[in-house]
Image (cartoon, rainbow, N blue to C red):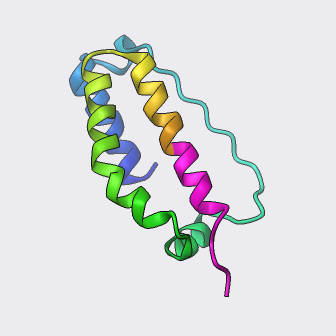
Amino acid sequence: MGESEEAFLCLLHRSCGSLESCGLCSYCQFCSQKTGSTEGHAIAGTSPLQNARVADAPRRLEICRNAILNRDFEAFANIIEHDSDMMHSVMMTPIRR
């Protein structure tokens, strides 16, 4: 588990008292991808969408934090899905050299 995942779980634990009381279940499935995460991170900056995604990150993070603190699963799910859509848009628009 990376630092960001640990920080997120720590935030959940602090806001809920325990991970179990958050009602959060996480499931990760690893599958092969045409472009792996390491390469994706390296080429993300070539996408014309990446600067806007990075600039908007603090706003999305604040929405995420508020959703967790308010136990608003719908708001949490919406912002996570929005972030995922933005990330995948970046990954689909790199300029490969």
Residue occupying the point 48% across, 28% down = 78
Residue occupying the point 23% across, 22% down = 15
User: Is 37 part of what is drawn in magenta?
Assistant: no
* Residue farthest along the bottom direction in this orientation: 97
Q: How many marks?
A: 0
Q: Nearer the viewer, residue 34 or 6?
A: 34
Residue occupying the point 55% across, 70% down = 47
x, y percent for residue 18: 30, 18
Q: Find residue 5 and report its image quarter.
A: top left
User: Is 86 part of what is drawn in magenta?
Assistant: yes
Looking at the image, residue 88 lies above or below residue 66: below
Q: Find residue 26 and report its image quarter.
A: top right
Residue occupying the point 43% across, 33% down = 79
x, y percent for residue 92: 67, 61
From the viewer's perspective, tell me whether residue 25 is left or right of residue 7: right
Q: Quadrant of the C terminus?
A: bottom right
Residue range corresponding to the magenta coloring: 84-97
x, y percent for residue 9: 35, 34
Q: Find residue 54 and report its image quarter.
A: bottom left
From the viewer's perspective, tell me whether residue 30 is left or right of residue 49: right
Q: Nearer the viewer, residue 23 or 76?
A: 76
Looking at the image, residue 54 lies above or below residue 46: above
Q: Nearer the viewer, residue 65 or 5?
A: 65
